Amino acid sequence: MTLRGLVDHYGERVRAHPVQELLAGVGVAIGVALAFAVLVANGSIATNARALVHGIAGSAQLQLSARSGDGFPQSVTERVRLLPDVAVASPVLEQRAHVRGPAGTRTVNLVGVDRSITDLEGSATRQLDPALLILLQTGVMLPSTLAQELGVPTSGSDRRILLEVRGRAQRVGVSAVLNGATIGPVADAALAIAPLGRAQALAGLPGRVTRILVTPKPGRTAAARAQLRRLAAGRLTVAPVDREVALISQAAAPSYQATGFFAAIAAICGTLLVFNAMLLTAPERRRSIAVLRTAAGYTPRDVVQLLLFEALVLGTIASAVGIALGVLLAKTAFSGAPSFLSFAFALSGRVAIPFGTALAVGAAGVLVTCVATAPPLLDLRRGRALDAVEHEQGEAGQRLPARVRNAMAAAALALIAGACLVAAAEPAATVAAI
């Protein structure tokens, strides 16, 4: 068949049965939207954490970190810099803090850095002029998104917030509001940035840091790690710089399971809606195919092309609408990290939309539509009369033989029994059993 013929035939079908086609499209769109929104929201947590870590750490591959919030002496930094296989070492002080502004309160990470942070060339730190850190000793710097949530203006002389850290509440000035052009992905994170000395004074930890970011010399990562371990002597932790990303993924695993289960249910509901809508039109489709084969001389190949074209058009349009709705849901209803993660980690609220995920979910929507459209192809079986649909008892395609009904009932009972046994034997597998 020609493309024009396929388009004309499908146009006639849509005009004849708009409600059924719309219902099928809505089913695909709902399933795709909910599944895509959940996958994007889950994936954004680790993606944002990774972007935040590498935005600050830059070329650093290792870190020497404290095992308590009290940190360790800043003088250890000089000892790290003297190690033969260390190229750059930058001290950092991190403390959880509460910030109150004119419009609200947020839990943030107070991060203190010194001028060596720019040597790491992270996307969030390369624009921090060392001279700027010296000039802004009197206050803290806030990312633009956090400043907006707190109601802190981007400019002006009277910009003050209440900062509570380690039980000490102090009113401090906002020296600068940093946007994405300056600090990249950190612009959406819950951070308050200050020069190291100022952060130490605010936290009541003079001369102490909580981690040292380390860039090894090229090809000397393993040797640098061994040297750091000897220096740590079991009192400090030597780990990859993105260790926090792994901790976040581990902490978010229960949330991933719950939302993943929700996405699976959404996909199943959408699939059922698509199949029901397609089954409503199955008798008419089968009659139409019989007429085309007997009166117009359509071959089985022509029929396959016709049904496949209809499914591809419907599935592609509905999946595109579903992905658009999924993006909207991910940025509204599913936006932000779970509260239990936000309490422990300074996560960004940015929603990452991976092209691969959109392509996979959209392809799944098209595949479901193609499968739902396939039942009329059973009339193309060899040895079956061209107009066999006209000789069936009752409504065409709606009668199930007793043998099929009994088999389906037995399968349903077996599934229920199997799910109950799995849930009873292994409670942790209840979600899988359902």
Image (tube, rainbow, N blue to C red):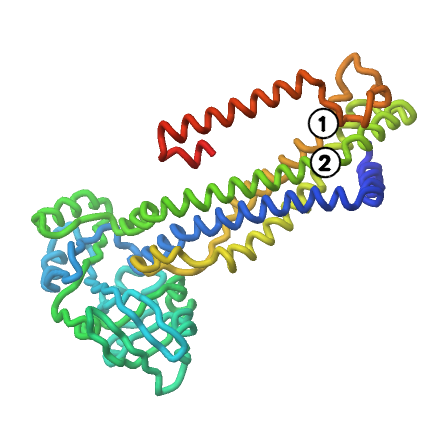
Left or right of 385, for residue 419: left
Which corner quadrant of the image does residue 3 belong to? top right
The amino acid at mark 2 is Met
Q: Are marks 1 and 2 in contact (CB under 8 Å)?
A: yes
Q: What residue sits right under mark 2 in the picture?
A: 278
- What label does residue 375 carry, if any? 1
CA gap between label 1 and label 2 equals 9 Å
Tell me which label, 1 or 2, sits earlier in the chain: 2
Left or right of 2, for residue 167: left
Q: Position of residue 188 (x, y in %)?
A: 40, 64
The amino acid at mark 1 is Pro
Q: Residue at x 87, y 28 (%)?
A: 292
Circle 1 SS class: helix
Circle 2 SS class: helix
On screen, 227 above or below 406?
below
Q: Position of residue 258 (x, y in %)?
A: 43, 44
Closer to the camera, 282 or 351? Answer: 282
Left or right of 157, for residue 207: left
Closer to the camera, 98 or 224? Answer: 98
Does any portion of residue 385 appear in the rendered image? Answer: yes
The residue carrying pointer 1 sits among few (fewer than 14), some (14 to 19) or many (20 or more) residues within 10 Å by Cα, namely some
Looking at the rendered image, the quarter that the N terminus falls into is top right
Q: Position of residue 99 (x, y in %)?
A: 31, 72
